[in-house]
Amino acid sequence: MDEYNLQRLAGYLREQRISAALLSNPATLTWLTGYAPEIETGLSPFEGGPALSWWHEGALTLVVSDQEASAAQCHGVEVVPYLSYTFEQRLAGLQRQVQALGELLARNAHLTGRVGVEMGFLPAAIAAALRESLPHAEFRDLDGSFDVLRAVKSREEIGKVRSALKLCDHAQDYIRLNAVAGTSELELWGRVRGYMEAIAGTRLPIQADLVAGKRAANVGGPPSGYTIQDGDVLIFDVVPRVDGYWGDNAATYFIGEPAPELRKAYSLVWSALKRAIDAIRPGIKAGDLDQMMRLAIRDKGYQPYPHHSGHGVGTTYHEEPRIVPYSGLVLEPGMVLAVEPGIYLPGLGGVRLEEVVLLTADGCEILTKHLLDA
């Protein structure tokens, strides 16, 4: 359990005059408890809906399948399990989860006033059971309510993000040494993924862009059967989840001697990245940081990149603060921020460089260690 985050949740609900809450967003559950539901193969056909958490009077109770009960209990949270896999009865995970939730809520059937609910992840059957179990409650939608709260990380969360980012750095080191002409993107990806999992000692959910040659002009994409050629540029953006928290970084590599325009683009992206990192400190607005990087690219005669300039990382791999033109969010100490400008040249390739920083009281600490000087 993360007591710091639990206190922040309780404070928010108090301000909103919400006396109880049903939480269903997996990112919220990990943020509060440390329990990270399995995502590598998606929701199990033996389970019901997503893991649920009932918050009332300062205490959390998870409703999870019996397959996940031990993993959840390891984090010091009360668990109400329901039967999932069985060969003696029909598969009915959702019905059993509804029943388990109904039995838990029956203790609170008298509740009146506001009950918060993260509705976006709830199956209709669970939403119906909730309303039936608490007939006197006034329900309030909590979807998105914790996004800004989650942006400021606890000490425990920062430690987990550091571990995930260290693994990203190892992956970039591997690519730097092993990206050679004659290897396909898929072959290189298979090797680097195995390398990361060997270091972690477990299977990992991993998202990645690995694109070479002219494909790198398309911003990103999964690895393909394309064979890397001498003179190609290669973008590798890797995003693994370790112990429920995501890491992220990106680098661009030249296979042999690149076109002069690509080397120039690399230098400009590097300059834009370093300028932004030097400017990051509490009080700056996310939208102003975005504009700073886009202008650094545009002022040199290049088309600004067609994506965000950065984003938070934590229990999801893209979260607040979003470094985008419309955002007026003011950066605060404790936020963890990926910063990633780029230049993409049709017919040639592209460049994207990404560092992750931790906002401190008077600036920021660079958490990633993978980029070399331009």
Image (cartoon, rainbow, N blue to C red):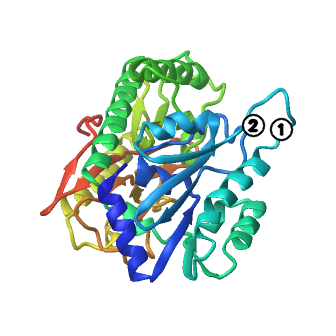
Q: Quadrant of the C terminus?
A: top left
Most extreme residue toward the left, as rendered?
A: 362
The residue tagged 2 is 46
In this picture, is 124 found above or below 266? below
Q: Is residue 129 left or right of residue 54?
A: right
Picture quadrant of residue 112: bottom right
In this picture, is 247 found above or below 313? above
Query: Between residues 345 and 359, which one lies in front from this camera angle?
Result: 359
In this picture, is 135 found above or below 205? below
Q: CA distance from mark 1 to mark 2?
A: 6 Å
Q: Residues within 10 Å of mark 2 (few under 14, many from 20)?
A: some
Picture quadrant of residue 341: bottom left
Residue 236 position within the rendered picture, expressed as x and y whole percent measured from the top left? 46, 35
Residue 282 position within the rendered picture, expressed as x and y whole percent measured from the top left? 21, 68
Residue 35 position within the rendered picture, expressed as x and y whole percent measured from the top left? 47, 43
* Tally of marks: 2
The residue tagged 1 is 91
Residue 162 position within the rendered picture, expressed as x and y whole percent measured from the top left? 29, 40
Along the polypeptide, which appears first: circle 1 or circle 2? 2
Q: Check if mark 1's residue and mark 2's residue have beta carbons within 8 Å.
A: yes
Residue displayed at 38% across by 47% down: 265
Residue displayed at 34% across by 25% down: 173
Query: Between residues 313 and 139, which one lies in front from this camera angle?
Result: 139
Q: Is residue 74 left or right of residue 140?
A: left
Q: Amino acid at mark 1?
A: Leu
In this picture, is 230 found above or below 136? above
Tag 1 secondary structure: loop
Residue displayed at 58% across by 69% down: 108
| Res 192 label | none
Looking at the image, can residue 176 be seen?
yes
Tag 2 secondary structure: loop
Q: Is residue 3 left or right of residue 327?
A: left
